[in-house]
Amino acid sequence: MAAISDEFTTGSETVARYDRVQRLLHWLMAAIILAAVAIGLYCSTQAPGTPVRRALLEVHKSLGMTALVLVVIRVGYRLFAGAPSHGRYLGRLTRLAANSAHLMLYALMVMMPVTGYLFSAAGGYSLPWFGLFQWPRLVPVGKALASTGQYFHDWGADIIYVVLALHLAAVAWHYFVMKDDVLARMLPPRRKAS
């Protein structure tokens, strides 16, 4: 299916951008994921059971479940809309690295909330969504299942730090070194000066 995208001409160059919906979902999820990662990292340094840690974990869980819902929407929309073509050939190795990193990011966007949910649900902990409601407990309370969820959630956290750092480094490399349109594809067009 042909990609639905916004194309804009900047000078003599045309940049094929992701459409508005894809850009909105990308940046909204980036903010949610970075906030969840920062809160999770901070909470890992705090003593269990303190009121601040408990309150922050409620926000962390809410952000994680929001990210899970949004990634389902994002993947569905991406399958429908596709992706815009690159303005310049990136090379096989660069494309392979980019595709691998994106698959890993999508896998983590699913794995982290699912394992966090499993840890909380099986551990008998709350399953909040910003104090508005509790998610249903779809698994039985049990120590073994909670430990499995916690193990994979902790393991995934270590991986997500690395993958996010590599993603940001790749963006910087494309922008500052390659000076190509990779970042521009996910940004809104610049308004022309009148």
Image (tube, helix red, strand yellow):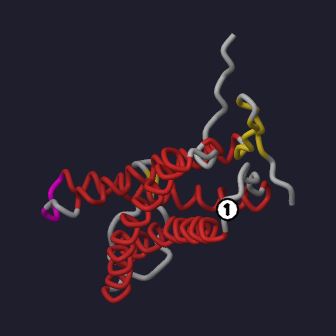
Label 1 Cα crowd, 10 Å radius (few <14 / some 14-19 / many 20+) = some
**Residue occupying the far bottom of the picture:** 144
Q: Quadrant of residue 94?
A: bottom right
Please tell me which residue lies in front, 52 or 124: 52
Q: Quadrant of the C terminus?
A: top right
Horizontally, residue 30 falls left or right of residue 45, namely right
Q: Is residue 81 left or right of residue 55?
A: right
User: Foreground: 192 or 42?
Assistant: 192
For the residue pair 26 and 165, the one nearer the viewer reads as 165
- The front one of 14 and 23 is 14
Q: How many numbered circles are shown? A: 1
Task: Identify which amino acid the numbered label 1 is placed on.
Answer: Val
Q: Which residue is mark 1?
A: 75
Residue farthest toward the right in the current orientation of the protein: 1
Residue visible at 38% across and 50% down? 35
Residue at image x 36%, y 75%?
Answer: 119
Secondary-structure class at tag 1: helix
Q: Position of residue 16 (x, y in %)?
A: 74, 44
First to last magenta residue range? 47-51
